[in-house]
């Protein structure tokens, strides 16, 4: 196990390195930070001074070295919009995004676990067809459109919930449902097929043969084993979840990292974009590692090699 | 020109024709056996027809503004105007016409981006799986690092730098989503290259390129087509999302995602602006998913067994 973790951690290093390289290339090679940072009518001298100040007169490889050196110290440069270091600006927005992501995950779990199990145990029934159909529909619907429709129904027509912003629990309801149902659609399908897999196993037949109550067979022998892939799937949804917060936060004006990122991309505030992208990539990479470990821990049949 | 070859040609044509007709009828009889496959096929055909004949089908010029008839509700509601079946938007543009014309962008972007991604991913996956070793490690770590950055974020950054346009949208979508295909093709290649017929080909001295093209590619292609079809669906949603966020299609061009972003502003008074383009996206994507699922059952029966 230890050897496996070390091996996985070692594999992360080149990936992280490549992520920084991608982010660096994107921002520093393809764009022109000087013309992005200065007004249109800046003189050539001003541009040159800016270039020297930003270190852009140095060879690219040196620039990348400096970028990496600063990154290790948590210094992503200053946001030119806020005139402050980029990292704290992002960390300030992080709790709002985590709140939304966790709430969405709870919504997804509450919806998908019971529905996935029930539709597997009642395979090919009307209920199963309805749930399978709904999860396809959930996949086909653009998530942000669902959000807009929920605003239309619950905020505009019924006036029950606030349209946008953050603060009370009522503010959280619609964004969490929007983001959560998108993930629930995928999870329900996977739980159903994972459960079907398990219910066909010999030990389920044995459990039934020895006269156990069906509820115990399903819960204890079936569901607990079906959970193994589900845990992995949940961790692997991190990227989707964070990608989803970008757009959900924009729809609901939720003051999180996603909204900040969209604003920063639109304002070409690249220091913030770089920092946020790097942090998100870290999150995704480590949750994928966690998924791998959890899978191996929960299912001892898998060997570490 | 010698007589025998001509006779051969005619004979070949004679043999070929009924065979092809048989294929087509086989295709449709298999398609119509699946309810969802049929629905998907019909939706996709309708959307393709709408996109091709958009200028003739759209009752109005999708960009024509008309202040006098702005924010008119659909025709069945109080205040609806006879000509505008699905109502008009904040600039008095006809919603139905914009939805019909918007199908062009969705399909064009969806299909071209998938083709681009598919070609890149196929080549990378074949090389990675076939040669293994250092090349494989480099390509797979690159794939991992692409997967570490959420698609939509990656795309937003590149679009912000390249400047949003139809071409850059296709390039960005294709240039980022290729990793899915690379992974799939690589893992298929890994198992196929160990099969006996590939070993025999190698034993008689076939070149690498020949082995890849004649023995491995044909065996990867059916799973590839299934994934590509389903990815047209997710690419259409991505295009809509990017256009909604303002970094995709730019006005005065028409896109369903762009219409949703207009509609978001007028939600309190005019529900129809944001509702109908969303229905158009959902139905189109649903049709493609249904068609893709049916293709999977036909082309890749192994997956059907797994699906349960």
Image (cartoon, grey):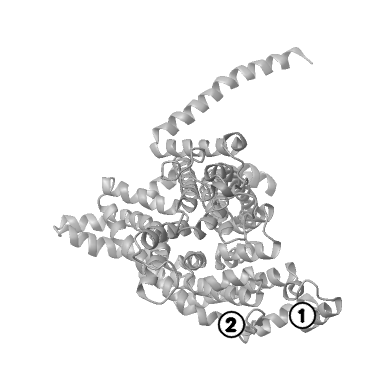
Q: Secondary structure at mark 1?
A: helix
Residue B278 or B13: which is nearer the viewer? Answer: B278
Q: Position of residue A256 (x, y in %)?
A: 50, 74
Is B9 drawn above or below residue A95 in the view shown?
Answer: above
- View extreme (bottom): residue: A73
Q: Are marks 2 and 1 in contact (CB under 8 Å)?
A: no
User: Which label belongs to residue A62?
Assistant: 1
Residue A121 or A54: which is nearer the viewer? Answer: A54
Q: Position of residue A285 (x, y in %)?
A: 52, 72
Can the viewer see residue B203 in this picture?
A: no
User: Which label belongs to residue A73?
Assistant: none
User: Closer to the camera: disc 2 or disc 1?
Assistant: 2
Q: Secondary structure at mark 2?
A: helix
User: Which label belongs to residue A87?
Assistant: 2
Q: Residues within 10 Å of mark 1 (few under 14, many from 20)?
A: few
Q: In the picture provided, is A43 more to the left or to the right than A288?
A: right
Q: Position of residue B120 (x, y in %)?
A: 65, 53
The answer to which quarter of the image holds residue A59 is bottom right
Residue B235 or B59: which is nearer the viewer? Answer: B59
- View extreme (front): residue: B68
Q: Position of residue B243 (x, y in %)?
A: 58, 57
Looking at the rendered structure, whether the residues under marks 2 and 1 are on a common chain is answered as yes
Is A163 drawn above or below residue B47 in the view shown?
Answer: below
Earlier-in-chain disc, 2 versus 1: 1
Please name the residue shown 53% across and 71% down the image: A259
Can the viewer see residue B4 in this picture?
A: yes
**Which part of the image, by quadrant, shows the N terminus of chain B?**
top right
Chain letter for mark 2, please.
A
Q: From mark 2 to mark 1, how far is it between C-alphas?
A: 22 Å
Q: In the picture provided, is A95 more to the left or to the right than B153?
A: left
Chain letter for mark 1, please.
A
């Amino acid at each position: 196990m230890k050897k496996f973790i070390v091996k996985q951690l070692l594999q992360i290093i080149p990936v992280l390195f490549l992520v920084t390289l991608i982010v660096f290339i994107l921002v520093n090679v393809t764009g022109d930070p000087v013309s992005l940072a200065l007004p249109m009518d800046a003189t050539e001298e001003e541009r040159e001074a800016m270039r020297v100040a930003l270190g852009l007169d140095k060879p690219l490889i040196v620039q990348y070295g400096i970028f990496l050196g600063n990154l290790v110290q948590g210094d992503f440069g200053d946001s030119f919009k806020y005139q402050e270091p980029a990292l704290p600006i992002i960390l300030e927005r992080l709790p709002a995004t985590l709140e939304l992501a966790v709430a969405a995950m709870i919504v997804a779990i509450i919806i998908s676990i019971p529905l996935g199990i029930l539709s597997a145990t009642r395979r090919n029934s009307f209920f199963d067809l309805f749930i399978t159909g709904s999860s396809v529909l959930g996949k086909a619907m653009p998530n942000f459109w669902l959000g807009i429709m929920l605003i239309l129904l619950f905020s505009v027509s019924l006036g029950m919930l606030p349209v946008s912003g953050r603060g009370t629990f009522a503010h959280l309801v619609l964004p969490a449902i929007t983001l959560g149902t998108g993930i629930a659609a995928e999870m329900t399908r996977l739980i159903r097929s994972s459960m079907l897999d398990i219910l066909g196993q010999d030990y389920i037949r044995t459990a039934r043969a020895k006269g156990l109550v069906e509820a115990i067979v399903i819960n204890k022998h079936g569901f607990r084993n079906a959970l193994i892939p589900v845990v992995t799937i949940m961790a692997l949804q991190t990227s989707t979840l964070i990608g989803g917060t970008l757009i959900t936060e924009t729809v609901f004006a939720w003051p999180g990292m996603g909204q900040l990122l969209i604003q920063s991309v639109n304002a070409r505030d690249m220091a913030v974009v770089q920092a946020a992208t790097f942090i998100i990539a870290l999150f995704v990479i480590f949750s994928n590692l966690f998924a791998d470990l959890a899978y191996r821990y929960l299912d001892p049949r898998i060997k570490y090699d | 020109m010698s007589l025998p070859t001509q006779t051969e040609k005619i004979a070949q044509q004679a043999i070929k024709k009924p065979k092809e007709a048989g294929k087509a009828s086989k295709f449709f009889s298999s398609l119509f056996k699946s309810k969802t496959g049929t629905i998907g096929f019909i939706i996709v055909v309708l959307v393709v027809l709408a996109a091709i004949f958009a200028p003739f089908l759209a009752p109005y010029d999708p960009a024509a503004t008309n202040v006098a008839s702005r924010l008119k509700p659909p025709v069945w509601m109080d205040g609806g105007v006879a000509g505008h079946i699905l109502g008009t938007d904040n600039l008095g543009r006809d919603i139905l016409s914009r939805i019909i014309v918007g199908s062009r962008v969705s399909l064009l972007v969806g299909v071209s981006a998938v083709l681009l991604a598919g070609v890149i991913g196929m080549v990378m996956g074949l090389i990675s799986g076939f040669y293994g070793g250092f090349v494989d490690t480099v390509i797979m770590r690159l794939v991992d690092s692409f997967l570490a950055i959420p698609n939509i974020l990656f795309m937003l950054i590149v679009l912000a730098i390249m400047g949003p346009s139809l071409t850059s949208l296709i390039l960005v979508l294709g240039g980022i989503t290729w990793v899915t295909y690379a992974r799939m093709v690589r893992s298929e290649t890994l198992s196929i290259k160990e099969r006996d017929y590939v070993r025999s080909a190698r034993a008689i001295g076939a070149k690498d390129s020949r082995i890849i093209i004649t023995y491995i590619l044909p065996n990867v292609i059916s799973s590839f087509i299934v994934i590509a079809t389903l990815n047209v669906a997710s690419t259409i949603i991505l295009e809509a999302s990017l256009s909604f966020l303002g970094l995709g299609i730019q006005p005065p061009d028409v896109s369903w995602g762009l219409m949703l972003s207009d509609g978001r502003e007028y939600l309190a008074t005019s529900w129809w602006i944001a509702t109908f383009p969303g229905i158009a996206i959902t139905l189109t994507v649903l049709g493609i998913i249904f068609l893709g699922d049916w293709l999977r059952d036909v082309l890749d029966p192994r997956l059907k067994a797994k699906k349960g």
